[in-house]
Image: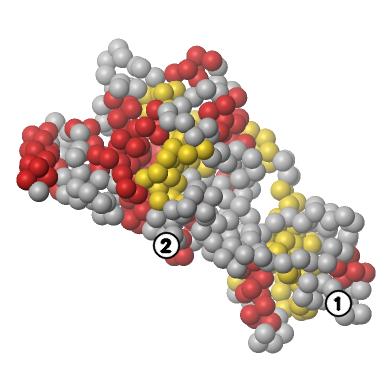
Amino acid sequence: MAGLRRREVLAGAVALAGAATIGLNPGTAAAATQQRPGAQFPPSLDFGDYPVIARVRSRRALEHLRVLSDKIGSRIAGTEGELRAKDYIAKVLRDLRYQVTLQPFPIADKFLGGLSVGRDSWQTGSSPQGAQDVTREADVVDAGDGTTLPDDLTGKIVLIAAVTNKADAYLTATQRGAVAVLLGRIGADPARKLSAFSPTLATPVTVPVLGLAQVQVERLRERLAKGSVKVKATATHHKNLTSYNVLAERPATFPGKDDGVVMVTAHYDSVPGSPGANDDGSGTVLCLELARVLRYLPTNKTLRFALWGSEEYGLIGSRHYVSNLTDPEAKRIAGCFQNDMVATSWDPAITYWLLSVDGADNATTAAVNAAAKRLGYDPRVKGPVARGSSDHVPFFERGIASGNFSWRGESGPALLEPTYHTPEDTIKDNVSLERLQISLELIGSAAYSLLRK
């Protein structure tokens, strides 16, 4: 206990002595030495941690997330939602006085659907092999898994959803007069709900065929259990699309010295039907809050933020960015901190995972591990372990130190929350301010330590 007390006193003394230098008042600096919410141990901060820990606030980040997830909602690559998010992100970074560049790139057509149920509007996928740019309004007939269909479906919209749907039921429904078909997928695992999708049909049909998320099927069936339900189904083909990366940087501050670039990144798009609060609105707003906190701090390296478009369709934005780097530009990047799903409120996601493509340590994972130890979070942090599936992959393939940082289940990073990629990935249902705060502190402290080297 005596040793611990001496460490606390020394940390407090360092905070008070350095407060004026880093622009903090003594009370604010001293508060940073207290045990962090969610931490297992009191902190033992180094000098560069103070301006990050004392200033960064998850509630400020939440203000941005309310715009992205609640106001804009689904941000499908190249469509209006993603473009509105791009403009918002760029404005925030410009207002913070960063040098902002928009990097456009073409992407494939999108086939999306919409379902109006009473006052509710749900985004879905739609089949490329079904009718497009049309709207159909009619009563819904629930045909279960499609094994048995009524002989006459004239003027009806047919719902077919189960763990295993009969493969040609959509075709039979249209032949019997259905004006639209709603296909849903039900997960075999009751703890894992499935997302909206764009169905691939073996035989094209002349009516819209929408792909519903499991929770949308459940909500529709709840209404049908109470009586007849009329819906409006729309299928839309989005053509000639462009997605954008939003890049923002601030040069090194020490005169005549620039020892490279440190990147803090996330993707801002989401999947159909999902407002993408945790995936990856949380990583996006982490970048925006750290941009506010780090903007005036002295560094030896250039600070660069990148918000990727079109991640959900195959890491398209980050791959475009990395492929357009010259070899000298790539060699200047000292590390890329990719933040993907950094705020889930799902109870089992108690572990903050450090994920590198090959499972090996590198400058980013080492910096986060070191920050976790200084801040007292290290028992909650695991890794690095091997995992791809996010925008750190193109950097690794180019030989650039990179890691993906995320809250997942304790048994392994493949254990994701049940609301992953669903309409329930909302602020209300799937965002923890405490976990977002921890993520902000870990990445902010780690990135700033690398920026100072």
Mark 1–mark 2 distance (CA, rounded to whole Å): 40 Å
Horizontal side of residue 239 vs 45, given as left or right: right
| Secondary structure found at label 1 | loop
The residue at the point 37 percent across, 32 percent down is 366
Residue 435 locus on image (x, y percent): 36, 53
| Residue 397 picture location, percent across and down | 57, 26
Give the mark toward the camera: 1 or 2. 2
Considering only order in the chain, which callout, 2 or 1, is on the residue closer to the N terminus?
1
Left or right: 369 in relation to 112 = left
For label 2, the SS is: loop
Amino acid type assigned to the residue bearing label 1 in the image: Thr
Q: Residues within 10 Å of mark 2 (few under 14, many from 20)?
A: few
Q: Nearer the viewer, residue 443 or 28?
A: 443
Q: Position of residue 414 (x, y in %)?
A: 54, 50
Query: Which residue corresponds to the image point at 67% horizontal and 78% vertical from the top-left?
Result: 221
Residue appearing at x 33%, y 27% in the figure: 450
Q: Amino acid at mark 2?
A: Asp
**Residue at mark 2:** 347
**Can residue 196 be seen at all in this image of the molecule?**
yes
Q: Is residue 346 above or below residue 266?
A: below
Determine whether label 1 and label 2 are within 8 Å by CB: no
Residue 392 percent across, percent down from the top left? 52, 34
Where the C terminus falls, by quadrant? top left
User: Would you identify the image quadrant in which residue 13 lies?
Assistant: top left
Question: What residue is pinned by disc 1?
Answer: 148
